[in-house]
Image (cartoon, rainbow, N blue to C red):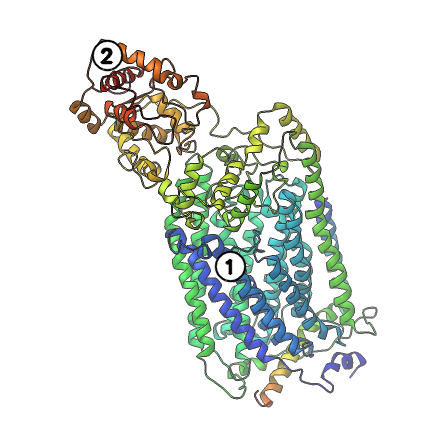
Amino acid sequence: MMTTLITVLTLILVAIVALWAAWPRLRAWIEQPKYDVLRQIREYEDAETKRPSE
Amino acid sequence: MSAAEAAGREFEIGRPFAPVEYGLVRAHALASLGGLIVAGLFGLLVATKFSLPEFLGQHAALSWGRLRMNHTQGVFFGFLGNAALAFAYYANPRLLGRPVASRRLGWVLFFLLNCGIVLPGWSLVSAGILQPLEWAEFPPVVDAAVILVVVGSAVQFLWPTFHLRVDRLYISSWYLVGGFTFTALAYPMGNVAPLCYPGTQGAAFSGLWTHDAVGLFAAPMALAAVYYIIPAVTRRPIFSHFLSLLGFWLLFFVYPLNGMHHYLLTPLPMDAQLGAIAASVYMGVDVILVVTNLLLSLRGGTQMVGKDISLRFIVTSVILYLLASVQGALMALLPLNRLTHFSDWVVGHSHLALLGFAGFAALGAIAHVWQHTPNVRYSRRAMAWAYWLALFGLLFMVVDLTIVGLIQAHLWNLDVPWMTSVAESRPYWALRVVSGAMLLAGFVCFLCGLFSGPRHRERVKDSRFHDLEADLVVPVVHPAPPGLRHPAGGALVAVALSCFVAGLVFFAFSIVALGTVPARYVAAEIADSTPAAWRPRTAAEERGREVYARQGCAYCHTQQVRAVEADVRRFGPATENWETREDLPHLWGTRRIGPDLAREAGRRPDDWQRVHLYNPRWVEPGSVMPGYPWLFDGGPDRPTAEASDLIAYLQWLGRPRQERDVDAAEVARAASARHKHMMGGMAMQEIAPISDGPPPRLDLSTSAGDLQAGAALFGQRCSGCHGMDGRGDGRAASSLLPNPADLTAARFSSRRLEDVLWNGVPGTAMPRFRDVPLRDLRAIASHVLNLGNGPAGISEEAAQPPTGGAAALAHGAVLFRVRCAVCHGAEGHGDGPAAVRLRRLPADFSRKQPRSERVRAVLLRGVPGTAMTAMQQNLSESDREALVLLVRSLFEDGLQGAPLP
């Protein structure tokens, strides 16, 4: 049972990686949050620099 | 701006600055440090007690077991729980652009966590109100508060997620969502199921929770901080968001399947064990993937590791995560598991994982949020000290525990006494105190550092970022591919559908695969293999089990003999499922500082157990076990009802198995049931315990070397009762009835010494010493023989030699037949008709030749605690002298030493 489980898990993993490799737009979409978070952090820091302290 | 970009930036419109609850950030950060220092102090006391077992040993609240429980629960809830919330309050608005659900709810959760869980939990455990489940020791009333806090936190931080209008989440948000969600599910499973399923079945669920506590709470919270702080400090995006998501899903899919690797080679179904091993290896591969992604995320920003203290903590945490996970995967492999399980190696591993990985990530997160919180800054100097003290303390501890773990594992695989491993461990346990003190000093430095930094009224942009800003990657918004957009908000779809559905299904699968299905197989096997004569524990034994659980005995003594040769040879036959059918909750334990107790019944007499519980060093001078004087009314001979119940329980452990094993038909039936129901079936090894068989021949020696070695061993193993000189005046002697033998007052045959050392003396506190190697038994027996032949004995005999001749001997024989033979037998072999009814068997004078003075003393005063009464009133002095002569003439072993005068 466990062997089956691990095999299925590995196949799912391979399928996801294949999908990721074959679909550039999906790849770009998946990677987008790592840029967004930097922008959000920057905006927070800028806002807090301008904002009077508590 | 495209529609997708507009959607992606919608949170900024009209509300560009979601407020951060800095009050809650500060409160949780300080509570986290407070929890860490107090829990660390508990840990330091626990470590100190290995070297000074009687340190603070007069109070139940400060006993080793309860301090240990408060140490781990304090780290889990007080330190990591508060740190996770401090980071979540700081990062969640930044990640989502939305405030948390409610500030008021935040303060309620803060007080509930610290004043409803941590402080009451510590107090209740100290008072003995607890549940004896590892990583789940706080009692059910506290568990209710834990559920409220986890669910409340999920609401607090998931609420803004559901109100997002973006179609994707950054990986830190995934981990926060996953961590709160799965902890809310895993906690009841780990805390309730083991209270509902007995023995082996409950252990399966306990194993799941023990690992889920790390994998579904500590690890996600730590990784959320790691994935946030690395880009925040280096000003560079992480290497691959795809790899981070892959790691996230693998963690949540595979981690729950690891749990059973805590109970390998037990009677749990072997298929489930093998599944846990496979999942553990898979998990190790996943962590390599995650750590590679994180280390690559430092590209171009590695100079910040030296400059930014929070990043230094975080990067160290990542490296230790890799070490702990690879080590964990290896430890799940049977060859290494067979060797290192139950040893200090495992304790080193858990410190590496919980403190090294999760703890350093938490400290890094606290440092980061503190430095970015208005009006407060940390002192770089103090934080640098904190980092180096904590790092060196941790590495020192882990290396120390790993080495001593290997030493213990090696010794346990040899046929040497258990106390040898304790004696060899003591120098390493002393070093462990030093490493613990370094860690605690680091934590105190950290706390001081938070308050000793420069104070700024306004947030000042740090100049160290300026040189990196030119390299900052400009975000490019990529709209969602067709088919992945959702009018109600992509995040809702992504989180609710992906995390809650797929994750929940897999989590449920882990419970079914590693909990429910094995429990079903175990239940069927128990039904088919329980002996017909099996009976439940008595009320006293059941109460004793509760005392055992309350005192935390399971933290040093396992109750599972694994199907491993070293275990079976040392402790007896491997545990079978039916033996645990009433153990609710199970008390299997995961660590052996003392020996396994699953086969304790009859090994040591009640008297010995009483003195051992009162002060273990009185009967076992090298022991590090804490005493339990609060279970007695002032002395070991005055046990309270709790002590008596506890001893009744100890004397029950393994008794049903002993009774079953004498019935060949029942043994065959159990073997058949085992093979029928075990998934995959693991053949139980038929290994003979080292203690089986008749007493061995010892071939006593009179060489100076052997006598010297025997004297040293006698001092270690026997002097607690018999005294250093063997006069029966050790520290425990006055508490034992009958008193320990004065070994200078008699000469023993070699067969008698072999029998006593191998089987003990029934009806007395003299235990059997079957775990002592034969060469050591030979040395001890030689020393004892020498005590009886020693200068003291000869001089006393010479001073007052027995009087009379053949006539006196004949008179003595008549008296002996009339007065003594009913117990001692006609030939003085201790086998008279009344002997079988006596708890303490009468002396066998063919194998023991008491000195004349000793015979006279016994005739005058009797032997307290035995059936031997004083005969002063009924015998004249000449009668007594005749008996002295007769008794001494019965000795048959003339080969051992020169005859006494």
Report the chain holding disc 1.
Answer: B
* Residue for badge 2: B808
Task: Tell me the CA gap for discs 2 and 1.
Answer: 71 Å
Quadrant containing the N terminus of chain B in the rendered view: bottom right
**Numbered-mark total:** 2
Q: Position of residue B42 (x, y in %)?
A: 46, 60
Q: Is residue B35 above or below residue B125?
A: below
Mark 2 or 1 closer to N-term?
A: 1
* Quarter of the view holding residue B142: bottom right
Q: Secondary structure at mark 1?
A: helix
- Residues marked 2 and 1, same chain: yes
Q: Position of residue B305 (x, y in %)?
A: 50, 71
Q: Is residue B34 above or below residue B737?
A: below
Which disc number belongs to residue B70? 1
Label 1 amino acid? Asn
Q: Is residue B783 above or below residue B296?
A: above
Which disc number belongs to residue B727? none
